Structure formats: structure tokens, C-alpha cells
Image (spheres, rainbow, N blue to C red):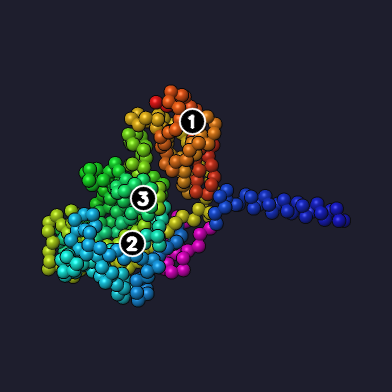
């Protein structure tokens, strides 16, 4: 009896371990839980609210927001001085008011709030409900900047403009990205605009869905902009020069006055005071632990770039949730990691030929099969 009981216990233990191994993800991540202070905790597609401000408290939550205090023109020759006093909670809304008043050498005041080091994300779905100020010369924005700037100063580490509005173009909204290769200093920025009625009198949801190699912009659930990394169209630069959006970014809410864009047609002083109102800010992340069921597809189409020495690219792998990174194997050994489907091989011997294979890794830690081999001679 004791022997039979022991065998039965061993079989049960093996069954439990097998089930655990089957369901446990390779990188051990756990299902996400929505934060308690988000009014809409999940969205279709497995998005879970990880950060939110519904502005229900009487004061601005300084555990979530920083105030920028300066009059340096925002890098765009703007005319305002940013003060904390120009932002407040009124009737459950964040109100950022631009005023015509002399302060610290400036003739206008306003506010700029950021989430830096208090809310920083790498890939997310961000929804901001806001109503725009009115008046020529106003330049409100909902946008993002890199937390650490891993690729260098602006524009090298990127900028994501979820929504910008300039008062002299009534009811026209804009979404734009800036990178080393694509930025307004060079006149190469990539952007989209849309006519939307009543943006100054009604709250609209301004949203992006940001995933590896892609940022899609929406207003009230309608897509009006899409930015995607395409390696075969960017063979002249490292991927981060074209699409550096694989690092932490933080959120910014502000109302600027004048500047290189907002002030193109001057400033109407009769418009002041005027305010951008924000009903809520919600940030969602994919519940990878619940959604991921499959390994990514095997990378295909390895090619040598035509105009960047020692650079290779391939078709992006597919996955049921998303590919987080690629492992680069050189002569059968793991040698490099890259977040998008391109890499420049460095530190190798000039004139030598190397066998390169690529392997995709998803957010759950599952890996694809190795790609076919590409022979690369270093120049």
C-alpha cells in the first residue's frame, strides 16, 4: 500500500509540474492588474489601465505630475513664462490657463506639466480627453519626450506629438513625430492633420497606440495618423535615427503662446485668458501574461543594406502580442540584440565573412526558430 501511494503521489506531482510548466511564461511575467484610480480599467484587445489621473481630487496630484517653471521659450521662441499657478483642478478637470500678464520679463503666462520619472512608458496606449483653448497665437499640445534620451539630445531620441493645435487653424488637429532623420529643423518631419469640429467647445479623446515599430493616432476612436518603421525604406541610417521609439517616454501637457508655429500669424491679445481643459489621462498596457499563447514567427528575408556599411535588415516577425527584440547570432553564437528589424554589425574584423542568423523574442520571452543564414563580409 505504501509503495502504491508513493507512486500515485509522484504521478500527481508530475502532473502539477507539467501543467505549471505549460502555463508559465518563459520570462515569468504575471497578469496585469488595473490601478484603482482609473475609471475605465480595461479596453478591448487586452489593454489594462496601468496609470491614470481622473482629476477628481481638489489639488493637482504631485505624485503624478511635475510643474516646469521657466521662461526659456520652450525651444520654439515661445512668449510665455510657465508657472504652476496657471494650472488647477476645477469641477473635476485639469485647467491650464494662458494669461496676458507681465511676469519675469515675459508678457504671457501659462503652465506645463510632465510625468517625467512619475509616469514613464515604453509602448502603451494613451488616451487624453481634452478641450482646446481658442485664440490666434495659442499652441496647446499633448505630447511625449524621452525620459533618458538614450540616443542623444533632440531630435535624436525622438518626440511624439499625440496632438497639437494652433489657434489660427480653427478645428484642425495635428499628430507628428520627430527623429534624427525626420524633424522640423530639416523640414522632413512626418505628420498628419484632421479637421475635427468643435475642438474648442467639446471634449475629444486624443489617443495613440504605440507598439514596437508603430505609433497610430486617433481622435474619438477614429484613426487619422500612422507612423511605422520600414527598414527597406531606411537603409541609409541605423533604425534609431529613423524610429527611436523603443525607450521610455513621459507625457507633457501644456499651452504655449506664440512661437515658431503657434505665433506664425501673431497673437490676439483679446483671446486671454483662455484654457485647455483635460478631463482625464489614462495609460494602458497589454496584458501579455494573459494574451500571449504563441512564439513569434521566424525572421525572413535577411538582406544587406544598400547604403549603410555592415548593416543588415529583415522582414519583421509576427506574434500574437508583439515582438520585443531580436537576437543576432554570429557564427552560431549569440552576439547582439536589437529592438527593431535592422542592425549594423560592429566590432568585427574587416575583410572577414561571418554567418549571421536572427531569432525573434516576444514580450513573454518566447523565441522563434533561427532564420536562414546570411553571409556578411565586413567592409
The residue wearing badge 3 is 149
Disc on res. 356: 1
Q: Main secondary structure of the magenta part?
A: loop
Which of discs 2 and 3 lies nearer the camera? The answer is 3
Residues under labels 1 and 3: Cα distance? Answer: 30 Å
User: Mark 3, residues whose alpha carbon is within 10 Å: few (<14), some, or many (≥20)?
Assistant: some
Residue extent of the magenta highlight:
31-46
Is 177 positioned to the left or the right of 101 in the image? right
Q: Residue furthest top?
A: 351
Which of discs 1 and 3 lies nearer the camera? The answer is 3
User: Mark 1, residues whose alpha carbon is within 10 Å: few (<14), some, or many (≥20)?
Assistant: many
Q: Are marks 1 and 3 in contact (CB under 8 Å)?
A: no
- Front one among 16 and 275: 275
Q: Secondary structure at mark 3?
A: loop
Disc on res. 114: 2
**Residue 62 position by quadrant:** bottom left
Amino acid at each position: 500500500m505504501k509503495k502504491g501511494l508513493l507512486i500515485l503521489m509522484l504521478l500527481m506531482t508530475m502532473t502539477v509540474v507539467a501543467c505549471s510548466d505549460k502555463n508559465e511564461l518563459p520570462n515569468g511575467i504575471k497578469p496585469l492588474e488595473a490601478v484603482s484610480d482609473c475609471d475605465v480599467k480595461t479596453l478591448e484587445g487586452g489593454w489594462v489601465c496601468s496609470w491614470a489621473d481622473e482629476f477628481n481630487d481638489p489639488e493637482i496630484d504631485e505624485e503624478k505630475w511635475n510643474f516646469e517653471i521657466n521662461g526659456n521659450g520652450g525651444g520654439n521662441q515661445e512668449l510665455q513664462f510657465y508657472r504652476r499657478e496657471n494650472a488647477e483642478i476645477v469641477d473635476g478637470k485639469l485647467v491650464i490657463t494662458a494669461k496676458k500678464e507681465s511676469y519675469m520679463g515675459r508678457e504671457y503666462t501659462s503652465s506645463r506639466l510632465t510625468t517625467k520619472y512619475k509616469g514613464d512608458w515604453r509602448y502603451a496606449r494613451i488616451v487624453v480627453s481634452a478641450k482646446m483653448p481658442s485664440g490666434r497665437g495659442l499652441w496647446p499640445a499633448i505630447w511625449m519626450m524621452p525620459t533618458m534620451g538614450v540616443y542623444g539630445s533632440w531630435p535624436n531620441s525622438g518626440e511624439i506629438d499625440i496632438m497639437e493645435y494652433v489657434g489660427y487653424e480653427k478645428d484642425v488637429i495635428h499628430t507628428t513625430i520627430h527623429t534624427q532623420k525626420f524633424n522640423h529643423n530639416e523640414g522632413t518631419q512626418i505628420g498628419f492633420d484632421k479637421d475635427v469640429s468643435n475642438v474648442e467647445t467639446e471634449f475629444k479623446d486624443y489617443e495613440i497606440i504605440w507598439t514596437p515599430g508603430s505609433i497610430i493616432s486617433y481622435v474619438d476612436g477614429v484613426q487619422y495618423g500612422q507612423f511605422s518603421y520600414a527598414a527597406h525604406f531606411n537603409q541609409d541610417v541605423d533604425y534609431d535615427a529613423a524610429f527611436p521609439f523603443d525607450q521610455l517616454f513621459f507625457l507633457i501637457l501644456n499651452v504655449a503662446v506664440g512661437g515658431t508655429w503657434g505665433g506664425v500669424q501673431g497673437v490676439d491679445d483679446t483671446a486671454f485668458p483662455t484654457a485647455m481643459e483635460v478631463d482625464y489621462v489614462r495609460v494602458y498596457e497589454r496584458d501579455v501574461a494573459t494574451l500571449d499563447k504563441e512564439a513569434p514567427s521566424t525572421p525572413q528575408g535577411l538582406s544587406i543594406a544598400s547604403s549603410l556599411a555592415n548593416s543588415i535588415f529583415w522582414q519583421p516577425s509576427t506574434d500574437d502580442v508583439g515582438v520585443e527584440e531580436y537576437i543576432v547570432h554570429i557564427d552560431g553564437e549569440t552576439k547582439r540584440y536589437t529592438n527593431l528589424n535592422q542592425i549594423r554589425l560592429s566590432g568585427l574584423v574587416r575583410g572577414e565573412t561571418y554567418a549571421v542568423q536572427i531569432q525573434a523574442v516576444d514580450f513573454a520571452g518566447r523565441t522563434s526558430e533561427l532564420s536562414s543564414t546570411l553571409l556578411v563580409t565586413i567592409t
